[in-house]
């Protein structure tokens, strides 16, 4: 199958999943995308994104011969244990954008609409120094009522160790943009072809999308295969 063919691999991947409708049920489309080339290494459709299916997806990726040195996710907790089980030697990093967005959502739910807080939050990772990031996180506490600090910032505190690694590194991706771009293109395809009537149809259309997607990817600024062939 097309989605199980080995392609270029840099050792750094972004993993995520999104909803798709198959029949009358909602399923999850999982994707592992190479952070450097943007190539989808493996995709699969599962009924849930719980820890069992996250582990199953990563195990299948490993079975295909991919052993990533770094895996970046959007912060979904199920991947923490799954990565430890399947790829214990891989470094697990979190997407800075998704982490900050989760804090914004918490702040809105707590009815915090302070412009200074929002501006300061957006600058947390805009630095080349980890100590600056830590200082900015500490400053965020001062902009909130003491009773709201844990409610709004607990996720940032807990996930900062896996996110701050990329602050002063040129080798680690800071976001999961590669897989987000993949899903962005799939969404355009899904809006015209989906929802799918059954799993056979879903897999057929997924392979059709992957075929077109692989021929349209540009790697490192070079022409994509379709451009190279006129």
Image (cartoon, rainbow, N blue to C red):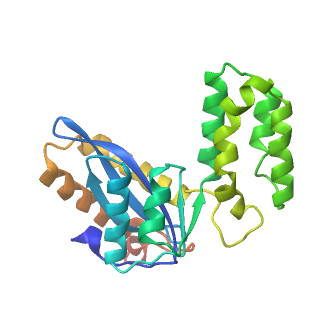
- In the image, 167 versus 217, the foreground residue is 167
Q: Position of residue 135 (x, y in %)?
A: 86, 48
- Is residue 114 visible from the viewing direction of this image? no
Outermost residue to the top: 111
Residue 226 shown left or right of residue 147 in the figure: left
Location of residue 177 (image quadrant): bottom right
- In the image, 154 versus 172, the foreground residue is 154
Residue 207 shown left or right of residue 224 in the figure: left
- Is residue 179 visible from the viewing direction of this image? yes
Residue in the picture at 65% in, 68% down: 172
Vertical side of 163 occupied by 1: above or below? below
Q: What is the number of callouts on the image?
A: 0
The C terminus - image quarter: bottom left
Residue 91 shown left or right of residue 194 in the figure: right
The N terminus - image quarter: bottom left
- In the image, 119 versus 111, the foreground residue is 111
Residue 78 shown left or right of residue 91 in the figure: left
Location of residue 195 (image quadrant): top left
Q: Position of residue 38 (x, y in %)?
A: 48, 66
Residue in the picture at 84% in, 45% down: 136
Q: Position of residue 134 (x, y in %)?
A: 82, 51
Vertical side of 37 occupied by 187: above or below? above
Q: Position of residue 25 (x, y in %)?
A: 21, 37
- In the image, 187 versus 84, the foreground residue is 84
Residue in the picture at 81% in, 59% down: 130
Residue in the picture at 54% in, 76% down: 69
């Amino acid at each position: 199958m097309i989605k199980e063919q080995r392609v270029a691999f840099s050792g750094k991947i972004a993993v995520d999943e999104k909803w798709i409708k198959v029949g009358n049920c909602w399923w999850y489309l999982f994707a592992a995308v190479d952070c450097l080339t943007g190539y989808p290494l493996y995709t699969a459709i599962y009924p849930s994104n719980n820890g069992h299916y996250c582990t199953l997806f990563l195990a299948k990726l490993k079975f295909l011969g991919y052993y990533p040195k770094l895996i970046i996710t959007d912060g979904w907790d199920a991947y923490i244990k799954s990565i430890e089980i399947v790829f214990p030697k891989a470094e697990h990093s979190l997407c800075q954008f998704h982490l900050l967005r989760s804090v914004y959502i918490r702040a809105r739910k707590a009815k915090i609409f302070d412009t200074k807080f929002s501006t300061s939050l957006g600058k947390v990772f805009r630095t080349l120094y980890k100590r600056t990031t830590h200082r900015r996180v500490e400053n965020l506490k001062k902009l909130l009522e003491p009773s709201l600090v844990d409610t709004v910032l607990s996720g940032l505190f807990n996930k900062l160790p896996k996110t701050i690694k990329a602050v002063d590194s040129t080798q680690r991706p800071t976001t999961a943009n590669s897989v987000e771009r993949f899903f962005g293109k799939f969404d355009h395809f899904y809006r015209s072809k989906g929802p799918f009537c059954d799993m056979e149809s879903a897999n057929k259309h997924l392979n059709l999308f992957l075929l077109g997607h692989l021929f349209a990817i540009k790697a490192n600024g070079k022409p994509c295969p379709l451009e190279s062939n006129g």
